[in-house]
């Protein structure tokens, strides 16, 4: 399987080709919202801004803070960003891929055949000497992409609960949120009973680039995961857990995403909640 990552040097070469890949800038702050102003101050030339909460999710509710968008909604959002069905797409952010991985996963889930994430994001691009443009780009001709769901495995709440006992369900949040010591975003703290904590921050280096596959495999093995394990991942709202799925793929492990994640789990008060380290 081709790597889900692209580095800055290769991206620079491909942007000189005809046609170049479609570039999506997915800068977003979970607490503050879309970072369009940062995009307008400087982005990779040709990139289109994507609003994670608007373009990559449905309205919050019983399905969590960032439920999956419908196929039609995602089709419209991607076409508005110039995404074609047969043209490569590269996504990036300035947060070690934690936000852009949502776009990577959704494009894969909805059937796009060629999508990669810029390893190291905007910092890697500028470190490699890449220039930035200011302002906003607009699409003159809408893209041709049509979303067809089912390209990546997903879990609902009952299947996530079952996987926590029959396989491995990884909680991608910070350890203190997993333990229930703090909860800055959701009204209830804790984790799904039986889940194991492996923070997405452990998937990347201090420079914000993904660790090599051997290091990832070793870290996931410590959480009880190997190529024979049925694995799922969740987080607070299904955003950073996509980063976990990508890291697992780099390690050679297929994982399902629980899109509703913790924010959907706690919407039903009958669902059990665990706290503590295990």
Image: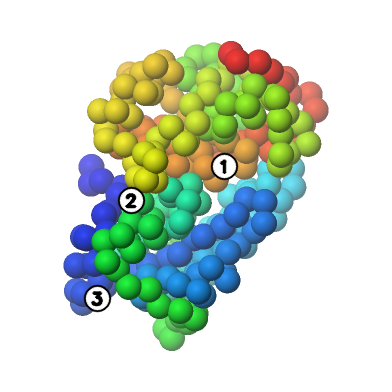
Marking on residue 238: 1
In this rendering, does residue 257 appear at all? no
Viewer-nearest residue: 212 or 187: 212
Based on the displayed image, in which of its 4 quarters is residue 204 positioned?
top left
Viewer-nearest residue: 186 or 54: 186
Name the N-terminal-most of marks 2 and 1: 2
Viewer-nearest residue: 96 or 20: 96
Based on the displayed image, in which of its 4 quarters is residue 215 positioned?
top left
Work out whether 121 lies above or below 185. Answer: below
User: Is the C terminus in the top left, top right, bottom left or bottom right quadrant?
Assistant: top right
Work out whether 202 lies above or below 97. Answer: above
Determine which residue is flagged by label 3.
19
> Residue 85 at x, y = what percent?
35, 65
* Contact check, label 3 and label 2, Cβ < 8 Å: no
Name the N-terminal-most of marks 1 and 3: 3
* Secondary element type, mark 2: loop
The crowding category of the residue bearing disc 3, from other C-alpha atoms within 10 Å (few below 14, some 14 to 19, many at least 20), is few
* Secondary element type, mark 1: loop
Determine which residue is flagged by label 2.
119
Which residue is at a point 43% across and 18% down the rendered structure image? Answer: 223
The crowding category of the residue bearing disc 1, from other C-alpha atoms within 10 Å (few below 14, some 14 to 19, many at least 20), is many
């Amino acid at each position: 399987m081709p790597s889900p990552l692209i580095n800055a040097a290769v991206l620079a070469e491909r942007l000189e080709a005809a046609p170049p890949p479609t570039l999506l800038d997915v800068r977003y702050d979970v607490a503050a919202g879309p970072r369009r102003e940062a995009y307008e101050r400087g982005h990779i030339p040709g990139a289109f801004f994507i609003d994670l909460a608007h373009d990559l999710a449905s309205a919050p509710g019983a399905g969590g803070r960032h439920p999956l968008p419908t196929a039609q909604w995602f089709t419209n959002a991607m076409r508005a960003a110039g995404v074609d069905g047969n043209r490569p797409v590269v996504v990036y952010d300035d947060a070690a891929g934690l936000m852009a991985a949502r776009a990577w996963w959704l494009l894969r889930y909805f059937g796009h055949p060629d999508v990669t994430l810029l390893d190291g994001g905007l910092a890697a691009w500028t470190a490699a000497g890449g220039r930035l443009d200011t302002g906003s780009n607009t699409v003159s001709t809408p893209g041709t992409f049509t979303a067809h769901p089912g390209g990546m495995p997903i879990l609902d709440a009952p299947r996530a609960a079952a996987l926590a006992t029959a396989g491995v369900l990884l909680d991608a949040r910070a350890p203190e949120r997993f333990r229930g010591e703090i909860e800055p975003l959701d009204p209830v703290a804790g984790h799904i009973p039986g889940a194991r904590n492996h923070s997405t921050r452990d998937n990347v280096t201090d420079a914000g680039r993904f660790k090599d596959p051997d290091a990832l495999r070793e870290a996931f093995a410590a959480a009880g995961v190997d190529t024979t394990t049925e694995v799922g991942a969740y987080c607070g709202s299904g955003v950073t857990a996509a980063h976990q799925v990508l890291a697992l793929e780099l390690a050679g492990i297929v994982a399902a995403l629980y899109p509703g994640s913790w924010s959907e789990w706690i919407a039903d008060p009958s669902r059990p909640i665990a706290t503590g380290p295990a």
